[in-house]
Amino acid sequence: SKNVIRDSHQRCIFIHDTNQVTVDDNVAFSTRGHCYATETGNEHDNVFTNNLAMETKKLLVSGTGQSDDPAKQLQNAAFWIRNMMNTFVNNRVAGCDDTGIWLEMKVKYGNQLNDDSFRDNVAHSCRTGLLTYKQGWIPAEGGHFKNIKVYKNWRGFKFHFTGIKFTNFVAADDRTYTYGFRNAGVDFEDSLFIGLSDDYRLRLNKDCPETNHGIDATFNNLLDGSNKQVHFKNVEFRNFNCNSRTITWGFDDRFANRNMGDPLVESGTTFTGTTLESARPALDCSTQNSQNWFMEDAHGVIGPNGKGPGFIIKDNAQMQAFLNGGCTGISYNQCSLMCEGACLRLVLIEPVGGGDYHSLTLTDQATQTSFTYTLDTWGESNGKAVVVVPKATYQGEFKDANGNSIITSSVNIEAFREPVCSNYVQSTDFTFQSDLCEGYYPGGVDKVVLSTVSESSLTYSSYSSGKRFPAIRLSASNENSCIRAETKLGVYFKAKLLNITDNNSPIDCIPGKNCPSGQFRIRQNKPDGEPYCNGWYYPPRSIVSWNKDEFNDVSSLFTVPAHCTGTDWKYFYFDINMGKGYPANTVEMIVDDVVVMIDEGQYTFPP
């Protein structure tokens, strides 16, 4: 406590594998390397309060253990924090070559000590005020930063955060704020962003902010419905004028995603001293790779003047597909449209089951308006249709690259965050061609029968040693395109064996070894005639007992091979075998109540 450190060529006060230390009311001036730090990330329950770092400079040589990142060995931070299970309160950074406060976590999923353990800290006149790049911090129980100020930095902050809340945060006179790559669920509440402060304007005789865009935000971050975008609650943007913009949404090409996840969420947002429409949040028009972008203006305050609530969207065909021409251009953002009164929601739609899926055509059943979405081939939405649509009832049809319809075994629908507007689309508003399989395929009926055979019998008329001749062959609906790769088929029949050389006396067998069983003969062709799959496929044997004097229940659950990925079944047969080869004209097998059905979870093994 109450130490002065100056002109140090390597660090100031470091805590190394030590706990419960208080570092309070110290001053460090003109030092090199990290200044105050928890070094290894194992430290906990230490207290840093009321400390000042001034003119923190970079090291002159590398290889001194400054960072876990080899590319940043010369990087310095006035406060280098490796573990948030420590307290940092009322510390000040006044000038640094690189970073004011750097959270470079040893364990990025580690938690914060408590709700008040990081508050009242200030960083100004640095290259970056507050940094969590590159490792990031994703506390399992969330984090809370209170009363943090970053100002007069080249970059106010650069985050890799998930689940962090800022309360009474102030950022002013910074050239930019990077809220981008891999951020999710970051909340700003009761906070203030200032483009040009009165102090900066008066002392430096500035009329315009240094920044071209206040918050530089990435929209194509994690496409996961549980990972939310930035939230603003009672946030003020002050004095963003001239050519500055409050928020610019851009595309980060380091991400595989071409689409966005949840949009910005705001309530109580105000623009003070920000008189130009061009300062409002908008899309970076140099972004070419994205398929969609949208932002809800829930209260009619972040969009163009004179417009009520609605959505601002990227100006392209798929974003407008079902809006019936209800959008108008935005004078200050040529690549966006204002759709007043619209209520949109992001939905991911994924076909399940084998098939060369290429596109999804949605049709609004009321207006008969249709649009075809190409299934995404990038990132987290790979193999899915990414749609942003208003409330309607939609009929969906999946197609291959040649425009041929493909009937799915099922469809996964993930609807993202509910918008503030109330009349939004639900996952139940989408129906698909798989529903046309009613009666043949899962659709609410108890049993969907593909083929049935009543009592039948066949006596072998020839014999080759060791072979098991088929007694009954039936077609398991080889023309039914509802049977797809990994479809589960329940197989049921009754059987008994008779010795026809001994007055039809009953024949015994050993369950699981040589009792009657079944097998599928399947061939499915590619368009060029070569097979996706071709051969004999055996359901598991499931007879647990055999009473030679009665009909015996035989059942099994068969899964269509995953490599049968097409839709053209050359044949799909089910053969019932005696269980072993018998001499010709000696044994008769009688079968009854044969059922092959698509299973929806109702299959049970015999008692």
Image (tube, grey):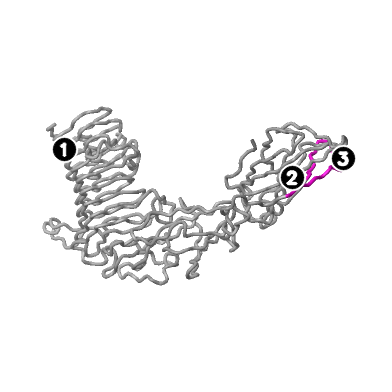
Whether residue 134 is situated above or below residue 242 in the rendered picture: above
x and y percentages locating residue 453 in the rendered image: 73, 49
Is disc 3 placed on a helix, strand or loop?
A: loop
Instruction: Name the one closer to the observer, 369 or 91.
Output: 369
> Which label number is shown at residue 585?
3
Residue 467 is one of the magenta-drawn residues = yes
Q: Nearer the viewer, mark 3 or mark 1?
A: 3
Disc on the earlier residue, 3 or 1:
1
Q: Residue at horizontal 88%, vertical 36%?
A: 501
Quarter-wise, where is residue 91 in the image?
top left
**Tag 2 residue:** 592
Whether residue 39 is situated above or below residue 592 in the rendered picture: above
Q: Nearer the viewer, mark 3 or mark 2?
A: 2
Whether residue 246 is situated above or below residue 151 in the rendered picture: below
User: How would you rate the neighbour count of disc 2 (Cα within 10 Å): few for under 14, some for 14-19, many for 20 or more?
Assistant: some
Query: Would you say 441 lies left or right of 282 here?
Result: right
> Which label number is shown at residue 51?
1
x and y percentages locating residue 194 in the rendered image: 20, 56
Disc on the earlier residue, 2 or 1:
1
Quarter-wise, where is residue 304 in the image?
bottom left
Q: How many marks are shown on the rendered structure?
A: 3
x and y percentages locating residue 177 in the rendered image: 27, 53
Q: Residue at horizontal 80%, vertical 45%?
A: 457
Which residue range is magenta in the image?
453-471
> Is any atom of residue 252 visible in this view?
no
Tell me if label 3 and label 1 are in contact, CB under 8 Å.
no
| Alpha carbons under labels 3 and 1: distance apart | 100 Å
Amino acid marked by disc 3: Asn
Is disc 1 placed on a helix, strand or loop?
A: loop
Amino acid marked by disc 2: Asp
